[in-house]
Amino acid sequence: MDRPRITIFDTTLRDGEQSPGCSMNVQEKLRLAEQLDRLGVDVIEAGFPIASDGDFEAVQRIAASVRRPIIAGLARACTGDVDRAWQALRGAAHPRIHVFLATSDIHLKYKLRITRERCLEQARDAVRHAKSLCADVEFSPEDATRTDVPFLCQVVEAVIAAGATTVNIPDTVGYTMPEEYGQLIRTLREKVAGIEKATISTHCHNDLGLAVANSLAGVQDGARQVECTINGIGERAGNASLEEIVMAMRVRPDRYAFETGVASEQLYSSSQMLAEITRVPVQPNKAITGRNAFAHEAGIHQDGMLKNPLTYEIMTPQSVGVPDSRLVLGKHSGRHALALRCEQLGHQFERRELDEVYRRFVVLADRIKKVQDSHLLELIQDVSSGNVSNSEVRGSQGKKFPPATAGLPLPRAVSAAANSNEAHPAHVSGSSGQTTVLIPFTDHHSEQEDYLWGV
């Protein structure tokens, strides 16, 4: 049975660009729009044409050159904004005017200083005007999740009657909870006359860290468009992350039986391009596209990964465009990962030789946190030449080991069969961090050694 298709509306170039420090010039926007086209998003919100001449030009150039997806331009609910948006979009193969107006009482009273009646009239008139210019019109009631629900239903019904083909329900300030957001979508579907004529969309902000959860809740309850950004960038704490939404549906089709047109293999390159253009790095632990998303340091995890990557990875790195998994050498690493890296560097050891390297590796990693290949080669050289005694480890004495990261690519197939009846190491560091004593253990090595060491 065919799964429902979710429209992916990317607003990296509009809402995402509003992140402090993330503004882009015309050429940068065009370059990223072309990448979003390769990524396979359905809608690119290219900008806010009335905001500046530069934004107008960016929307106009994207509309002229990126032909497959819908190109949207944002407009406030007034004639001047709508006209300016249409001037920028009219050359697009598939143009969309996106009109918005706040509907919550707090916004009406303190920001717009208008009544509900005036809000309803303004929304209806703006959509009607946009529809006279463009067949595809979207309307967003800003701060929808803090809007009185009966009034929100009234506004949505009015703009659909005026010609809106998509109604977006923004959680503008990231206030709502997933169950509330899902209930709101259900209520609109049940109570708004003519709702079947329009696509319901989500647009969730991440102030409480729930943007992706709220978006998925909306999809489960009937929304068929999701507004999101690459790397989750956007106002304040950002927007729902495109890559997280797409991969949640790919990895868990049992819970989210939907499909998108996104080419997931382009996710990582899209993330990296955005980081390069904005000079805002992706946080290391960012889901899907962070540098640690497919990196493993703990011995427990490394041992499992070497035996079968499915033990600790729920998707392949290649499925999102990451070249490969990495085993990072640090104090939590186990023998299996260390032995593999030594082999890749051209050194193979018998079991007891590896024990000696491992003892000193753990002490060194405890001091410098992460071990680079150059550090490991120096340590191997010291052990091979017998320069280090059994009771101390050189490293901070006469050798400089700055913090660094060693990336260990995971091989396609690794056969790991550990021997038994070998020594198990441990170390005790003095309070000054200068003296290390190695405590020999009786022989009780087993196949689970790296697992136990990582606990």
Image (spheres, grey):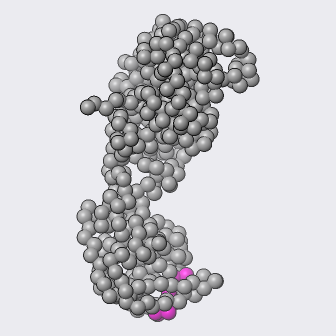
Q: Residue at x 53, y 13 (%)?
A: 157
Above or below, comparing residue 362 to residue 221 in the picture: below
Compared to 178, does 321 lie above or below? below
How many circles with numbers are drawn on the protein? 0
- Quadrant in the rendering for residue 410: bottom left
> Where does residue 252 sit, x and y in percent of width and height?
37, 44
Q: Is residue 393 magenta?
A: yes
- Position of 248 compared to 370: left or right? left
The rendered magenta stretch, by its main secondary structure, is classed as loop
The relative height of residue 188 versus residue 341 in the rendered view (above or below) is above
Q: Is residue 360 visible?
A: yes
Percent coordinates x, y for residue 347 in the rendering? 31, 79
Q: Which of 402/314 is in front?
A: 314
Q: Quadrant of the N terminus?
A: top left
Q: Is residue 252 left or right of residue 206?
A: left
- Magenta-colored stretch includes residue 221: no
Please tell me which residue is depicted at 41% across the width and 69% down the height of the picture: 300
Residue 185: x, y in percent? Answer: 50, 27
Relative image position of residue 61 (x, y in whole percent): 44, 23
- Residue 394 visible in the snapshot: no
Q: Which segment did they paint magenta?
A: 389-397
Question: Residue at point 74% right, 23% down?
Answer: 110
Which residue is pictured at 65% across the width and 14% down the height?
119
Please tell me which residue lies in front, 30 or 159. 159
Determine which quarter of the picture holds residue 432: bottom right
